[in-house]
Amino acid sequence: MKLTSQEEYGFRCLLQIGRAGPGGSLTIPEISEAEGISVPYTAKLLRMLRRGGFVKSVRGKEGGYSLARPADQIVVGKVLETLGGRFFEPGFCESHAG
């Protein structure tokens, strides 16, 4: 399976946040530096992940991004849909057996 760069970096951002542990959070600049991607691109990815319900954000001095639900409840396929769209349209498997 080949991932787009957006999907890969989105997953990497999500993993960084997950490594912060329950109750832990990271800021956009912290994630950006850890992954070696620009701050604006990191912000874009986190906005997508937040809208998808995978991360939540808190504003302010003690703010940052944290997981919106336990890591074991995050489904890879749903993250990929959020970051890059559907793999297959509904009904694809019925018409493309094998």
Image (cartoon, rainbow, N blue to C red):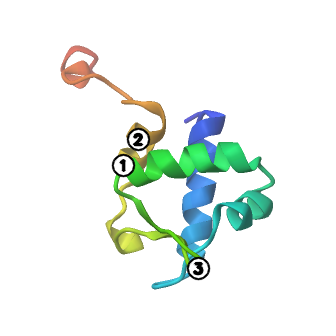
Instruction: Choose the circle earlier in sequence order: 1 or 2.
Output: 1
Q: Is residue 34 above or below residue 78?
A: below
Q: Position of residue 93 (x, y in %)?
A: 25, 24
Q: Position of residue 51 (x, y in %)?
A: 37, 48
Instruction: Choose the circle earlier in sequence order: 3 or 1.
Output: 3
Cβ atoms under marks 1 and 2 closer than 8 Å: yes
SS class, disc 1: loop
- Label 2 Cα crowd, 10 Å radius (few <14 / some 14-19 / many 20+): many
Q: Which mark is residue 87?
A: none
Toward the viewer: 40 or 52?
A: 40
Q: Residue at x 56, y 41 (%)?
A: 7
- Residue placed under numbered mark 3 in the picture: 20
Q: Position of residue 82 (x, y in %)?
A: 40, 41
SS class, disc 2: helix
Q: Residue at x 42, y 54 (%)?
A: 50
Q: Residue furthest top?
A: 95
Q: Is residue 84 above or below residue 31?
A: above
Q: Position of residue 98 (x, y in %)?
A: 32, 24
- Residue placed under numbered mark 1 in the picture: 52
Q: Tell me the quarter of the picture where residue 85 sits.
A: top left
Toward the viewer: 42 or 90?
A: 42
- Label 1 Cα crowd, 10 Å radius (few <14 / some 14-19 / many 20+): some
Toward the viewer: 88 or 27?
A: 27
- Label 3 Cα crowd, 10 Å radius (few <14 / some 14-19 / many 20+): some
The disc labelled 3 sits on which kind of residue?
Ala
Q: Is residue 65 above or below residue 93?
A: below
The disc labelled 2 sits on which kind of residue?
Thr
The disc labelled 1 sits on which kind of residue?
Gly
Instruction: Choose the circle earlier in sequence order: 2 or 3.
Output: 3
